[in-house]
Amino acid sequence: MSDHSEDSKSTSYLRWGGSLLAIVLLVYLFSRQGWGEIFGAIRQIPVWHIILAFVLTIISRLAVAGRWHALLAVTEIDVTWWKTLQLTFAGLFASNFLPTTVGGDVVRLAGAVQMKLDSAISTASLVVDRLVGLFGMALAVPLGAGPLWAWLITAQGWRDAFLTSSILPLGIKKIAGRMRDLFSRLWKSFSLWKDHPTSLLVSLGMTGLHMLCLYLSIALMLNSIGDPMPVWLIGGLWSFVYLVTLLPISINGYGVQEISLTLIFTNVGGISMKSGLTIALLIRTLQMVASLPGAAFVPAIIVGLRQDNGKNV
């Protein structure tokens, strides 16, 4: 129990330290570019483009819910689409606005258990949900691997890559532990779905829809500020940004996502630093706003979670 408590504390310190360092680096990049230029670039984007990008973000959130629902559908549990949607948006809201106390997956699991869903199956479905999302993103890696490698082999590339990953050493030990846990849980979690390939394919299709909406929203905004990039390249480069933000070195990827997106899209994608920072800011904002509907469902789940924890003490 003591070891678990100490491990939990060290993880919390690691995430706080990583987030703080990443945000400091991000503020440095913003100040070097100039806030006036960033907001000037945002003002270039037509309102209807912002609205369309927001609609695409909402669709991507619905696709994320659809991915999990497709996995839950093969179980013997009666889960309605509305329940899945509630829990997904509650998890998204918790991840964006309650990062210091409760993770999004914890909220989804707590909500599922409170809805009388089997806890073991719910946990397994969340693991597989994450793995399907990771696999979907991995499929886009080859699209950006060539340009990214061409950048990395230059001296400038190694310097900027070091800036992007300067907080990674903080989590090496944690990352190794996470990988061991991941593979251990992988074999256990897939036992229910290995005989239902259709469910996995539908779930992967939902991931593809989520990815396409994200890439199109980025392409739309880049076109609006006069710094276009092909959608295929956006997808390839974002896959690396996504992999970096998965590392347990910050709270919900705050700062890390923005820094990695800016440096990779700027140096590899060929857009300006101003455009990279603008897109990083807008993507984070759109994702946070799109998760706001989850605020209607989180309070009851949090109360139930605390009551359960109180009973277990």
Image (cartoon, rainbow, N blue to C red):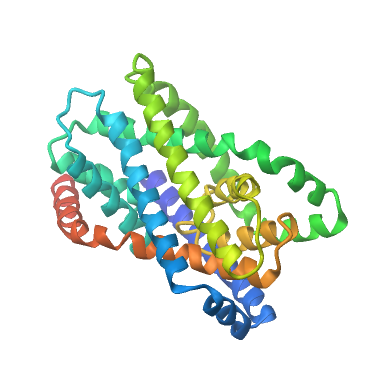
Q: In which quarter of the image is the N terminus?
A: top left
Instruction: Identify which residue, 271 or 78, lies in the foreground.
Output: 271
- In terms of image quadrants, where is residue 58? bottom left
Q: Is residue 87 left or right of residue 144?
A: left
Q: Locate residue 285, reporting x and y percent.
A: 44, 67
Task: Give the farthest residue toward the top.
Answer: 195
Q: Locate residue 292, reporting x and y percent.
A: 29, 63
Residue at x 60% of width, y 85% of height: 36
Residue at x 44% of width, y 33% of height: 132
Residue at x 48% of width, y 54% of height: 10
Asked whether the viewer can see residue 27, the reply is yes
Q: In this view, does 276 lie to the left or right of 146?
A: left
Q: Locate residue 109, reporting x and y percent.
A: 26, 42
Asked whether the viewer can see residue 100, the reply is no
Instruction: Identify which residue, 104 or 184, lies in the foreground.
Output: 104
- In terms of image quadrants, where is residue 162? bottom right
Q: Is residue 147 left or right of residue 246?
A: right
Q: Locate residue 194, reporting x and y percent.
A: 38, 17
Residue at x 21% of width, y 39% of height: 81
